[in-house]
Image: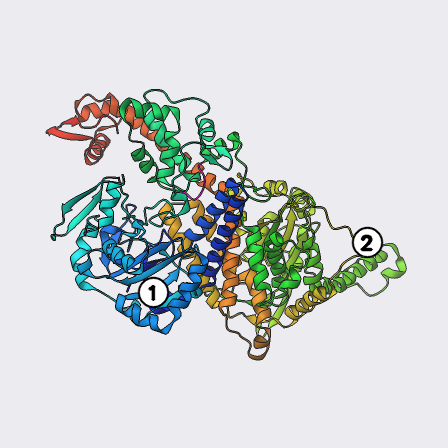
Amino acid sequence: MFSYQQNFFSETRPVDAKQFWALVCAPKTRELIDTVHRCKHEAAQQQAAGNDDGAKEQERQANDAKKRLPAFIFQATFDVTRSKKGFEGRWRKQAATRLTGLVVMDVDHVGSEELRVKSEEFAAAEFRQRAAELGILLIYITPSGMGLKIVFKADAAKGNLIDNQHAMAKVLGVEVDESCKDASRMSFICTKEDILFINEEELFTYENKDFAEKFESLYRGGNSQPTLQFADADADAADGGPAVAVRQAGDGHKVVRQDAAETDSGVDAADADSGVGNASTPGQQDAPTDGLTYRGVSYTKIIDAWLGGKQPGQGDRHRMSFLVGKDIRYICENDAKQVEKILRSLPWVDEIVKERNENVAQTAKEACAEEFKSYLPKKLREAMRKAGVPEDGQGTAAGDGGQTELPLTEWGERIGEMADSFPCMRSCLHGVPVSGRAAALFVSAAFLGTDMSRCWYHFYHRPEEVRRLNYCVYIIGDPASGKSFATRLYKLLAAPLIAADKVSNEAINRYKRERNERSTSSKEQKKEALKKPEVIVRVHGTRTANGVFIEDMNRAVDHVGQEEIHLHLLTFDAELDASTAASTGGQWIDKSTMELKAFHNEEDNQQYMNADSVSGPFNVYWNYVYTGTPLSLKRKVTEQNFGSGLSTRLACIPFPQSQFQMMELRRTSRVDHEADEEMKTWAYRLDGDARGELPLWPLVELCHQWASDRMAIAAVNQDRADELLIKRVPYYGIAVSAPFIMMRHWEEWKKTGTFEVDDNDKALCELVLDMQYRCQRWFFGRYAENYFDNMMNESLQRGCRHNNRMQQAYMMLPETFTIEDIEKAFGVKNDNAKKICQRLEKEGHLERVRRGEYKKISKTI
């Protein structure tokens, strides 16, 4: 049994046949590999057109998608170890290797025609006999679409892993990728369709104990080099390649070592800093030493801005080269080789190389080994801005926390692919650009979910509680960018609420008119007393008095069987600024508290002297959808109020810029009456017949796994900001996908009162999770980072004030001293002086010379 990693930062887990097929058949795998193929194709087109920067950007995006794939480690399983940060698990460490006896070999640069021929060859019946003879168990196309992975049985007589690869390569007539020599080497997974040959009977149970016994200790000691001396290695040396030195291994085998420095792949995944790891990526290719650029701006210019235009002094050049490398690695994929090239291009680094043969490679390696955060360092961001590096993304990020462009078009294409599987989805997307479909999906889900106000589900957090479909949705885009699509969706999808409210509002207005007439007419005053109508109004605009709002919320109740259930109120406003301005005065004031409590339907309370006001506790059942500009969002969610928790409750989805495109010139309107009618029909169905508990537990399990995987990464990175942003994302995974899943299983629901969640439903939920999480980081990532940084700084400042006093007192002590000296220096009495002395002794700052006399060990504390 071999291993896999869900992502680069997670521990390894064993793979059986069920887990293997689940991974290669997962919709997310197909989505990521499709992205790799698309970006690779676009990179080739950009390269052909002479656009090198465009090609590099597409390669970067392909690499990013590939690194998000799970990976198999066919060659090994791993012992339980602790990471440097103390996390216990089966981390992908070469030193913890347990060899399986399987070998994986890369065959790179295979053309599409050759792949087609090989696919037919491997599918032929006679190949199975040949594969059995060679010990081949698996062949699949790599995620790049331009290579093959061949997994086969190791033969101890042929040597170690790389020796076996050389032997197999000779039989198959292919070249070996020398970077695949390590036992802890990752192999990114493929889709089911990319598997050209598999021997299921042996692949998942194969074990070669003789091979493990012979070579395991070598790999644990960090030795991955060939144990046999191949003729081509000598030829390589003769041709001016790396010289080959032969030494005797412990078991009598010869070990070939190249003089050129080789990096060991015994990476501790729990302490790793990036997704680069052992997998070869385009970002690790050698780049020219001259003309190094990032998005068209030279690294030298960015570093000059980082240094503030000043060059490091003679005694500070090594330290600054390390600090520069530690920051610049964020924009060159944490690749030590690339960092080294960038550092060597700096004149002051070149100086110390010439003066004292500075080891720049070691500096770059140490810089890349530092903790790698999921966001750009603040100083680097500022330097990039000053150097004129083009900003990421479409639209403006309120918090500027996103570091990579949001894939709005990619999301839109994915939603478009799913639209035919989910009723009404295609109609909800009508007239919206592809890159705006994410916004349309969230808005339509919020209105449809409000129609389903008589439904509930249970969640993994406090599973005993009933959970509702709650939505706090902001659509953020530039003025006149097309956000008005939300108004159309509101009028159609909230039609049942609007129609019911029309009757209720007419009754209330009639009551108000009659009451006014009573106050002015003596004849009217003699009539029977007026009774205020007990009606339900659920749609409320920004000019709604608190008393009215709370009264309507308490009154909006229905019964589902024996259960009393509160219906959601709904607010839609096309101008976020209007609600922000209203919250500072007038009747809408103080609803900010209810905006926070709406997300979890928390309890609020009101006690006023006003005779007409509602008194007592009430729970907040309120969904709201706003569209607005980035500036309006900045006014609503600020760095100062970030700690209130509003941002993590929001689904804040960007709407793309218009990109200077004019609307189509038409004399007549083009209304899709069929789409409008479909949306309205479904709205009334959900409002009338969607009642009861939703069978969404499979989605809850999916969300729990999704959050667990990302929380593990946040734990490795000690990223408190990411931890905060992850926690509430799963609620939107459920809430946004639930209405479309309900419509998809409508007939089953009507017949049985339940339905089975399938892979299509899970794929939609996963897509929503990804969109919500990425948008959270995009808009509020920097706010979250600064929030925790500021907390840490305040703590450090308090600690520093304390430490400074302790430090000063400690410095006043002579080299040898007594308890009386401590009393004078620290200004304390005898008992406290003894406690301070005991603590300093325990911490190793002093030692006892003789009874009552002590000696300093350290200069500072």
Q: Which of the two discs, 1 and 2, labels the residue nearer the N terminus?
A: 1
Residue 404 visible here: no
- Comparing 505 with 349, the one in front is 349
In the picture, measured across the screen, residue 288 lies left or right of residue 691, that is: left
- Tell me the quadrant of the picture where the N terminus can be found: bottom left
Residue denoted by label 2: 667
Crowd around label 1: few <14 · some 14–19 · many ≥20 (10 Å): some
- Tell me the quadrant of the picture where the C terminus can be found: top left
The image quarter in which residue 561 lies: bottom right
Q: Which residues are magenta?
A: 373-377
Amino acid type at circle 1 is Leu
Disc sitting over residue 138 in the figure: 1
In the picture, measured across the screen, residue 13 lies left or right of residue 488, that is: left
| Residue 31 position (above or below residue 198) | above
Name of the residue lying farthest toward the bottom: 751
Residue 357: within the magenta?
Answer: no
Disc sitting over residue 810 in the figure: none
Instruction: Tell me the element at label 1.
Output: strand
Crowd around label 2: few <14 · some 14–19 · many ≥20 (10 Å): few
